[in-house]
Image (cartoon, helix red, strand yellow):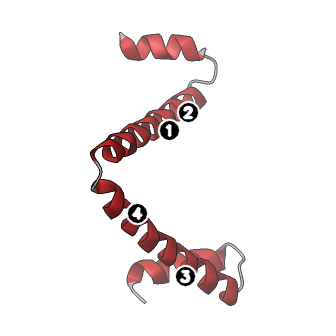
Amino acid sequence: MNNSAAGDFAVLLKAGMSAKQAVFYNLLSSILCLLGMVLGVFLGESETATAWVFATAAGMFLYIALVDMVRANGSKCLIVLLIDILL
């Protein structure tokens, strides 16, 4: 078990999970990480799939940034925030 997995395990235990649940979710996270890497390698072979992956990732980053800005400036309207960004 590496330091990251041990840290994740400790956080899961602190969140109230049993040791068995924490091991299960840590293992599930590791398996899904490996599957994501394999999927990424296969999608990287296709030119059109690569464009879609980049577009989706860019959209997610924009969404997260905008949600954070709207939450920080709760009194401003979303349209006003977008105009502020563009100017």
Residue identifier under label 3: 27
Q: Secondary structure at mark 4?
A: helix
- What SS does tag 2 mark? helix
What residue is at 39 percent from the left and 85 percent from the top? 2
Mark-to-mark CA distance, 4 and 1: 23 Å
* Structural crowding at the residue carrying mark 3, measured as other residues with C-alpha within 10 Å and reported as few (<14), some (14–19) or many (≥20): few
Tag 1 or tag 4, which sits nearer the N-term?
Answer: 4
Which residue: 54% across, 82% down?
27
Helix, strand or loop under label 1: helix
Q: Are marks 2 and 1 in contact (CB under 8 Å)?
A: yes
**What whole-number distance in Å separates the C-alpha atoms at marks 3 and 1?**
27 Å
User: Residue at 40% of width from left, 17% of height from top?
Assistant: 85
Callout 3: SS:
helix
Residue in the picture at 62% in, 76% down: 12
Residue 67 in percent (x, y) is at 55, 33
Q: Which mark is residue 39?
A: 4
Q: CA distance from mark 2 to mark 1?
A: 5 Å
Q: Which residue is mark 2?
A: 67
Q: Viewer-nearest of labels 4 and 3?
A: 4
Of circles 3 and 2, which is in front?
3
Residue topped by disc 1: 64
